[in-house]
Amino acid sequence: MKSLPRLGYGLGLRPVYYDEILSTRPPVDWFEIISENYMIPGGRPLAMLERFRADYPIVMHGVSMSLASTDPLDLDYLKALKTLADSIEPAWVSDHLAWTGVHGRNLHDLLPIPYTREALNHVVERISRVQDILKRRLVVENASTYVTFTQSEMPEWEFVARMAERADCLLLLDVNNVFVSGFNHGFDIDAFIEAVPADRVAQFHMAGHTDNETHLIDTHDQPIREEVWTLYERARRRFGDVSVMIERDDNFPPFSELLGELQRMRDIDAAIAADASRSAA
């Protein structure tokens, strides 16, 4: 399986911004789509996607693969996913370390798992099968979580690291999810960042969350918080030149605000590069 490209700074492709993107051709390096929104035989969504992919690299990000479910893998879903991927030739395909349904029902949520050796074996086997079906390496994201399991035998970051190595998959490090889960469960977010194998991280997600004082919820409907910007800098210094994008799925701001957040990423990365140059000199 070939290595993945470095794409730069991207955004989630959302219909509310279609017209502005097409008319202004903004300084965005790439766009990420929600795979399920385009896994259809035809119609306007696919027609619009063809217009965007003519000008920008596209990444497919799924929410329904249900990698950790005890249900059998949904082969019809994977066939449709592969058909879309073969058609639009995304830079890569990603989904979540979570389960979204059981007993044939899709609960439309990213649900947590116990970090046990049994769960690790189960997830590794399923990722390997998905990669064989798709004929491409899968990129797997750490989901935000709101409960933990007394059965867990290792911290999340150890589970993620072992999963990536054993399944030979890549990782989508959601920086906001690390912060949200760390706050909710009281773990050391720096330990998470330090434990993830740098050579496995292919992408970052950045997003805003809702602060309910006692807990945080990954809502993707707020600007990126200052604490998450700080963690982004920490992750960038650890993992280097990784493709990054912003998720915004509700309470949509003017497109210029998202461009401003992208520019802040560029500014942080430029400062890190300048620091590295001074150190080398």
Image (cartoon, rainbow, N blue to C red):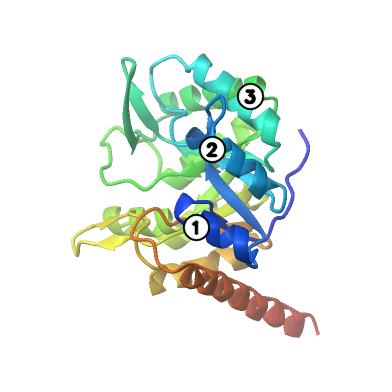
Secondary structure, mark 2, is helix
Mark carried by residue 83: 3
Name the disc covering residue 211, or none.
none
- Label 1 Cα neighbours within 10 Å, binned few <14 / some 14-19 / many ≥20: some
Q: Which numbered disc flags the more N-terminal residue, 2 or 3? A: 2
Reading the image, the residue beneath label 2 is 44
Q: CA distance from mark 3 to mark 1?
A: 26 Å
How many marks do you count on the picture? 3
Mark 2 vs mark 3, foreground winner is 2
User: In what quadrant of the picture does the C terminus appear?
Assistant: bottom right
First in sequence: mark 3 vs mark 1: 1
Q: Please state which amino acid type lies under the numbered disc 2.
A: Arg
Q: Which residue is mark 1?
A: 17
> Residue at the right extreme?
281
Q: Is residue 125 visible?
A: no
**Alpha carbons under labels 2 and 1: distance apart:** 15 Å
| Amino acid on which disc 3 is placed | Thr
Q: Residue at x 43, y 60 (%)?
A: 207
Q: What amino acid does circle 1 point to?
A: Tyr
Residue in the image at 42% along x and 55% along y? 178
- Above or below residue 275? Residue 6 is above
Tell me the distance, in whole angstroms, between the alpha carbons under discs 2 and 3.
17 Å
Q: Quick one: label 2 or label 1, which is nearer the N terminus? A: 1
Q: Position of residue 219 (x, y in %)?
A: 33, 54
187 relative to 86, above or below: below
Q: Position of residue 144 (x, y in %)?
A: 37, 48
SS at mark 3? helix
Task: Say few, some or many: other residues with alpha carbon within 10 Å of mark 2 (under 14 / 14 to 19 / 20 or more).
Answer: few
